[in-house]
Image: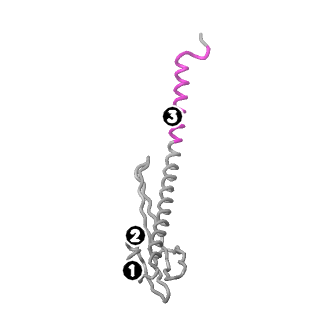
Amino acid sequence: MRFGGGRSARRRRGLVAGTALAVLAAVGLTLGVPLLRDRSQHRLERRADREVTATAQRTRSLLLAEPAAREADLRFAADTVDGVEVLSAAAGVAEVRLVFRVRVAKTAASVFGWQRAESSACFAQSVRPGVAPAPLERLPCPG
């Protein structure tokens, strides 16, 4: 008589080890996939936020390119930038203050299907002729 069993005992140990490995892999996938999806979505949202800031800077450059322009011309220049909506334009004594909203929607393919991120922010830029340019202000967006 053999000690430790024959083929059936080896087969049983192999099945137990294989089952344990399959269970560990299933648990790992169950826990890992949502974490990877969240990380991928977060990265896409950060890219959308960076693009909002870049679009606002591009709009600022357009506005400051014509410091002596009238309010209507500045409003038109800001409206030509894709994703920019002018909320208000107020002409003061020595400056024109534009408040505008920038909206960006990013879509990306990933292992988990299509992911979408939207971002928006409001900014104000004062344009003064002949004076050093004012900084771009980030404002809370109106409801």
Tell me where residue 102 sits by quadrant.
Answer: bottom left
Q: Position of residue 93 (x, y in %)?
A: 49, 89
Residue 23, placed above or below residue 47: above
Which stretch is magenta? 3-28
Residues at marks 2 and 3, CA–CA distance in whole angstroms: 54 Å
Residue where numbered disc 3 is placed: 22
Tell me where residue 135 sits by quadrant.
Answer: bottom right
Tell me where residue 71 sits by quadrant.
Answer: bottom left
Q: Position of residue 106 (x, y in %)?
A: 42, 59
Residue where numbered disc 2 is placed: 81
- Which of the image's four quarters has the N terminus? top right
Camera-nearest residue between 139 and 136: 136
Residue 112, placed above or below residue 42: above
Secondary structure of the residue carrying tag 2 is loop
Q: Residue at x 40, y 52 (%)?
A: 114
* Amino acid type, residue under disc 2 in the picture: Val
Q: For mark 2, does the 10 Å Cα neighbourhood hold few (<14), some (14 to 19), or many (20 or more) residues?
A: some
* Amino acid type, residue under disc 3 in the picture: Ala
Q: Is residue 143 visible?
A: no
* Extreme-right residue of the structure: 3
Nearest-to-viewer mark from 2 and 1: 1
Q: Is residue 37 visible?
A: yes
Q: Residue at x 53, y 25 (%)?
A: 14
